[in-house]
Image: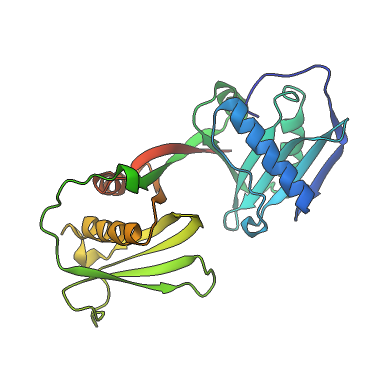
C-alpha cells in the first residue's frame, strides 16, 4: 500500500477476492507485473513471492475490468511468524484494497506475528504502518561486490589458506565451501576454520550466505582472508557480481564486507505487527 495516488474511475471488485495456495502461470505473471509496476511508481525495490518454492499463501483482488489490482502474500517463517508482502496498483489505492486483503489473510494467520518488509523510504508506506501501529523490528542491508569496481591496491601479506567446495544435494545451484589454513591442499583433520554457502542467482552472479569463522579462529584476520580468496576464485570463474544480506545489528560483519569491497545497495526494514 505504497502511495495515495488514485483514479476515481477505476474500482476493485471485492467479490473477486480469493485465496490461492498455488498460483497458476497466469496469476504468477500478473503478480510479478503488479509488483514491478508498483516498484517503478514508488521507486522501491521489493519482489512478490510468486515462486512456489517460497511457500506463500496468496490473496488476490481483481478490478471490475478483470485486472489484478492488488495482491498480498503471507510467507510462514517458523510456526508463529509470517512475512507479509502486499502491492496495490496506484490507480486503485485509497479504495480499501489493502484493508480487505489483510483482513482476509488475518483470518488464516490470526495467531501469527506478522512482519512487513519495507524497501527504501516511502511516506505513504510509513503512514500505513503507523495506522497499523506496526513498529520497526530490524533492518537488513543488501550488499554487492562487483569485479568492475574491485579495489586493485596490493593486499598485505596473505596467510597460507585454501578453499574446497561441494555441491548441495538439494539444490544444484548451491555450493558448500570450507576454508582451511595451511599450505596443504588436503583438508585438515581438525576441520575447517570457516564455512559459507553460495547460490547462483543469475548469469555471472552468486549470493553469498551463512558465512562463519569458527570461534577458535576468530580475531586473526581469517574472515577477511576467506572472503578475499573466494572473490579471487569467483573472478577467475567469470563471476562478476556477488551479493549478500546482512543484519544492520551485525556491525562486525558489515565492516568485514566493506573491507573486502562490498558496498550497500539496498536497505530492507522489517516492521512487526
Q: Residue at point 30% right, 60% down? A: 230
- Residue that extends furthest to the top in the rendered view of this protein: 8
Q: Position of residue 117 (x, y in %)?
A: 55, 39
Q: Position of residue 70 (x, y in %)?
A: 74, 35
- Figure check: 146 above or below 219: above
In-front residue for pair 86/67: 67
Please tell me in which quadrant of the rendered image residue 226 appears: bottom left
Please tell me in which quadrant of the rendered image residue 179 appears: bottom left
Q: Position of residue 139 (x, y in %)?
A: 44, 39
In-front residue for pair 127/158: 158
Which corner quadrant holds the N terminus? top right
Q: Is residue 107 visible?
A: no
Q: Position of residue 90 (x, y in %)?
A: 70, 25
Q: Residue at point 48% right, 37% down? A: 269
- Figure check: 60 above or below 164: above
Which corner quadrant holds the C terminus? top right
Q: How many marks?
A: 0
Left/right placement of residue 128 relative to residue 183 reads: right
Q: Residue at point 39% right, 44% down? A: 143
Colour logic:
rainbow
Q: Is residue 234 visible?
A: yes
- Residue that extends furthest to the left in the rendered view of this protein: 157
Left/right placement of residue 158 relative to residue 240 reads: left
Q: Residue at point 20% right, 60% down? A: 222
Amino acid at each position: 500500500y505504497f502511495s495515495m495516488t488514485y483514479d476515481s474511475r477505476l474500482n476493485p471488485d471485492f467479490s473477486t477476492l480469493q485465496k490461492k495456495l498455488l498460483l497458476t502461470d497466469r496469476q504468477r505473471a500478473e503478480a510479478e507485473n503488479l509488483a514491478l509496476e508498483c516498484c517503478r511508481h514508488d521507486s522501491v525495490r521489493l519482489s512478490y513471492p510468486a515462486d512456489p518454492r517460497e511457500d506463500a499463501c496468496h490473496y488476490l483482488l481483481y478490478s471490475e475490468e478483470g485486472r489484478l489490482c492488488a495482491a498480498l502474500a503471507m510467507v510462514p517463517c517458523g510456526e508463529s511468524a509470517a512475512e507479509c508482502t502486499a502491492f496495490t496498483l496506484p490507480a486503485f489505492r485509497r479504495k480499501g484494497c489493502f484493508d480487505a486483503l489483510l483482513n482476509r489473510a488475518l483470518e488464516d494467520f490470526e495467531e501469527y506475528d506478522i512482519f512487513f518488509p519495507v524497501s527504501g523510504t516511502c511516506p505513504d508506506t510509513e503512514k500505513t504502518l503507523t495506522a497499523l501501529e506496526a513498529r520497526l523490528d530490524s533492518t537488513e542491508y543488501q550488499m554487492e561486490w562487483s569485479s568492475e569496481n574491485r579495489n586493485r591496491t596490493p593486499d598485505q601479506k596473505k596467510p597460507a589458506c585454501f578453499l574446497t567446495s561441494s555441491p548441495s544435494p538439494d539444490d544444484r545451484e548451491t555450493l558448500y565451501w570450507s576454508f582451511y589454513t595451511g599450505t596443504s591442499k588436503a583438508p585438515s583433520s581438525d576441520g575447517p576454520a570457516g564455512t559459507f554457502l553460495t547460490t547462483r542467482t543469475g548469469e555471472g552472479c552468486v549470493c553469498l550466505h551463512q558465512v562463519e569463522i569458527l570461534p577458535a579462529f576468530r580475531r586473526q584476520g581469517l574472515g577477511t582472508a576467506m572472503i578475499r580468496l573466494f572473490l579471487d576464485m569467483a573472478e577467475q570463474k567469470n563471476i562478476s557480481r556477488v551479493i549478500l544480506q546482512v543484519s544492520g545489528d551485525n556491525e562486525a560483519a558489515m565492516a568485514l564486507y566493506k573491507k573486502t569491497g562490498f558496498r550497500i545497495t539496498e536497505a530492507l526494514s522489517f516492521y512487526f505487527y
